[in-house]
Image (cartoon, rainbow, N blue to C red):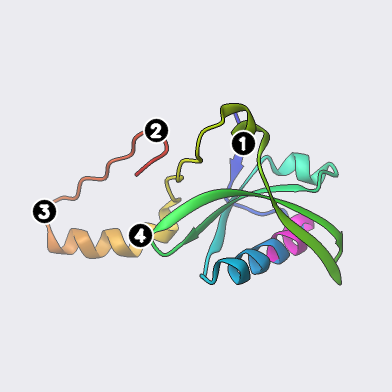
Amino acid sequence: MPTVSETIPEALRPRVDAALAWFNASEGAQFEVTGILDAEASLAGSDELRLVLCGGDRCEQRTFQVGGRPDAWEIALAESAEARRAGVPQAELDPPPGPRRGWLDAKLSQHAFVVLVFYRGFW
């Protein structure tokens, strides 16, 4: 099972920032990085970055190949090994508390309670 961390190690910050900027430009949307999966593998020299990206009303896990140098990054989306093995579409991830806190607070002030449904990676 992958290890998810909300803190991006400083050594990976330039690569993560480059991948995020590239993804936002290619998607035409504004996402932010809210987590990283298996940061140790990336710190050990792997070109693969597995990031949790949240923007608008969705969060997704995307895998990037980031190589090159800080002044000339080479970035591409990579299919994760898990996705290749499973052969199924990627489920959207439940977002960490930060991206949804404002929405949830607004809804709770309007209603007595709110029901959130999360099922097998979809919500």
> Residue at 49% of width from left, 58% of height from top?
54
Residue 81, image x, y percentages: 67, 33
**Amino acid carrying mark 3 in the image:** Ala
Find the distance from the CA under tag 3 to the CA under tag 2: 27 Å
The answer to which of marks 2 and 1 sits earlier in the sequence is 1
User: In the rendering, which numbered label is found on residue 120?
Assistant: 2
Find the distance from the CA under tag 2 to the CA under tag 4: 22 Å
Q: Quadrant of residue 58?
A: bottom left
The range drawn in magenta is 11-17
Judge depth for marks 2 and 4 and give the one in front. 2
Mark 1: secondary structure: loop
Q: Is residue 15 magenta?
A: yes
Tell which of 79 and 34 is nearer to you. 79
Q: Which residue is mark 4?
A: 101
The answer to which of marks 3 and 2 sits earlier in the sequence is 3
Please tell me whether residue 21 is drawn above or below residue 15 in the rendered image. Answer: below
**Amino acid carrying mark 4 in the image:** Arg
> Residue at 51% of width from left, 33% of height from top?
88
Find the distance from the CA under tag 1 to the CA under tag 4: 23 Å
The answer to which of marks 2 and 4 sits earlier in the sequence is 4
The answer to which of marks 1 and 3 sits earlier in the sequence is 1
Q: Which residue is mark 1?
A: 3
